[in-house]
Image (cartoon, rainbow, N blue to C red):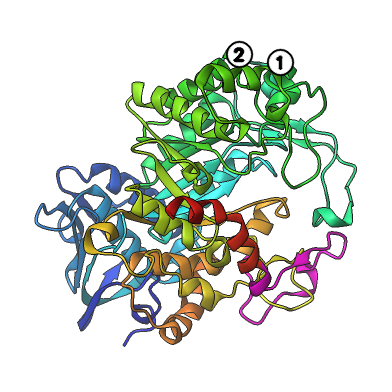
Amino acid sequence: MNELLTSIVPLPRSITASSGVFTFDATTALTPGPGTERVADWLRGALGPATGASLMPGAGGIRLRIDPGLPAEGYTLEISTSGAGIAGGSASGVFYGAQTLRQLLPPATLRRGRVTSGPWEVPALLIVDEPRFTWRGVLLDVARHFMPLPDVLRLIDLAAFHKLNVLHLHLTDDQGWRFEVPGRPRLTEVGAWRPTTMLGSRGHERYDGRPHGGFYTTDDLREIVAYAADRHITVIPEADMPGHMQAAIAAYPELGNGFDGPVRTAWGISEHVLQLGPEGLDFCRAVLDHLCDIFPGELIGIGGDECPATEWETSPSALERVRSEGLAGAHELQRWFTGRMAEHLAGRGRRLFGWDEILAGGAPPGAVVAAWRGHEPAGHAIRAGHQVVACPDITVYLDYRQSDDPGEPTPVGTRLTLADVHAFEPVPPGLGAAEMGLVLGGQANIWTEHLESARRVDYQAFPRLCAFAEAVWGPAERDFAGFSARLPGHLARLDALGVNYRPLTGPRPWDARPDAPGNPRTLPDRLAELHEMTADLRRERR
C-alpha cells in the first residue's frame, strides 16, 4: 500500500485502496457545495502557498459537500483518477476529510512556500471515518509562560491537523494574568508581569533574574476564537478562581485577605486566595461576563483547583460568609463560591467547567468536570451525574518527562512515554451504557512552568500529541506497533510544518536544560499521592 496511505494520523476507521492516482497540480479545481464554503476558503489558504494552486471552482478536482446521513463529525473521502470527493455530516466532517486529504499529499505541500513545482499524485481510495469522542482537547497554559498570539494560532493549526476540536486556554494563575478586563487596568499593568522566573523545579530555588509577562487584548482573544472556529476548534477559556489568584490580588490587594505583595515568582500553590466578600464576588462575576462576551462556547472555565483555605480560617470576610450562609466552616466556602459562579454563568446561558476539586461537597448541577487527579475522580463525577473530560496527569500531562534519559529538559512528573499516551483510555472501567455517555472525551494538558517558548512546547507535545489524537479519535482497541510503523511518515509532515518534535531516538544535546534541573517522580509515589489527594471523594461516596 502507498506509504502516505499507511502513515495517516489519527488512523481512519476504514481505508479501501483502489487503482490509479489523482493528479493534483496548479490547475486543480475546488468546488464547494452549500455549507462548505468556509472549509473551501481555509483549504485554499492551506494548499495554495506550497502548490501555486488557486483552487477555484470548476470541473473535476476537489468537491466538497454535506451529507446529512453521515455522523456530524464523520466524513467520507473518495479519490479516483478524476478527482477527490469529500462528504461530511456537517462542515466539521468535511473539514476533517480535507485534513486527511492534506496528509495524503506529499509533505512538501504542507510548507508555506513552493519548494517543488508538482504535479503531486494522490492514491485512489475510499476512506470512511468518524471520531469516537466529541471532546478531543488540548490545554495550553499561557499563564506560567506567556505565549505570543502567533504561537497560539500555530498550535491551533497543529491541533486541527490532528483532528482535535477543543483548545482549553488557561489564562490566569498565581504567576500571571493574561487578558484585559474592562475597568480593571492593573490586571495587565501589574498582574501580567513578574520580576523573575523560577528555573526548574521549585525545590532548587533557582531564578533567571529576568522580568517576564504579556497579555492578550480583547481583540487578540476574539482573533483566537475566530481563527479556531474556522478550524472547527472550540476555545474554552479558564480564569482560575477562587485559588491561583495571586496575580490578580497583586494588582488589586482588596481582592485578597490581607496580602499586599507581587505576582508570584515561584511555582507551586499560593495560599493567597480570593476574599469572599461582595467585592471579591463582583470582581469574579465581571471577569466571567467579559469572557462570556468574547467566547461563544457553552462552557466557561473557573478552574477551582488547589485552593487552600488557610487564609479563610482567619479572614473576617470569610468568617462572616461562613456565618451568614450557615456553613460548617471555612472548608465549605469553595463549594459555596463555585455554586454562586455556576448560577451567574447559568444566567448568561452558560455552564461551568472546572477541575475535579469542584466535586468536593458536590459540584453544581450541570457542571462539566475535568478529571485530572488520576483515574478515580472521573468515576466519582460520573456517578454524581456530571459530564466528564478525562485528563489524568499520569497519562496525558505533556509537561511530564518522556524518558529516563538524563538529557531530557527539566524532567518532572512521572515518566510518560509515547506508548503510555497512545494507550490512554478516557472511559473508566465498570461503567454502564448510560454512564459511558457522560464521558465527553479526553484532553492532553500542556502546562508551561518549564516550557518558556513555542520551541519547548513543540518538544514536549510532539509526537505524544499525535498519539493522543489517535487515542481520542479512534476505537478503544488500538495497535501501538501499527502506530509506531506509521509515525516516521507522519514525522516527515511535522518536519514540513516546522515542528520541533522530540526525536524518536531521544533528546539531542541541545535539548537539555542543565540550568533548570527537574524533579522526576516514580509512578508508585505519584499514585500514592493521588490516592491521598482524593480521599475526600472516597469519604463522600461512603
Q: Is residue 26 above or below residue 418?
A: above
Q: Residue at x 71, y 69 (%)?
A: 521
Q: Is residue 349 left or right of residue 246?
A: left
Kindly state the secondary structure of the residue where label 2 is placed.
helix
Q: Which one is in front, 67 or 196?
A: 196
Residue that mark 2 sits on: 279
> Residue 173, located in which quarter of the rendered image?
top right
Question: From the image, which quarter does the C terminus lie in?
Answer: bottom left
Residue 108 x %, y % = 47, 67
How many callouts does the rendering have?
2
The answer for how far apart the CA atoms under marks 2 and 1 are is 8 Å
Whether residue 160 is visible to the viewer of this picture, yes or no, is: no
Residue that mark 1 sits on: 254
| Residue type for callout 2 | Glu
Dot 2 surroundings within 10 Å: few (below 14), some, or many (20 or more)?
some
Q: Which residues are magenta?
A: 499-525
* Residue 508 magenta-highlighted: yes
Q: Which one is in front, 37 or 336?
A: 336
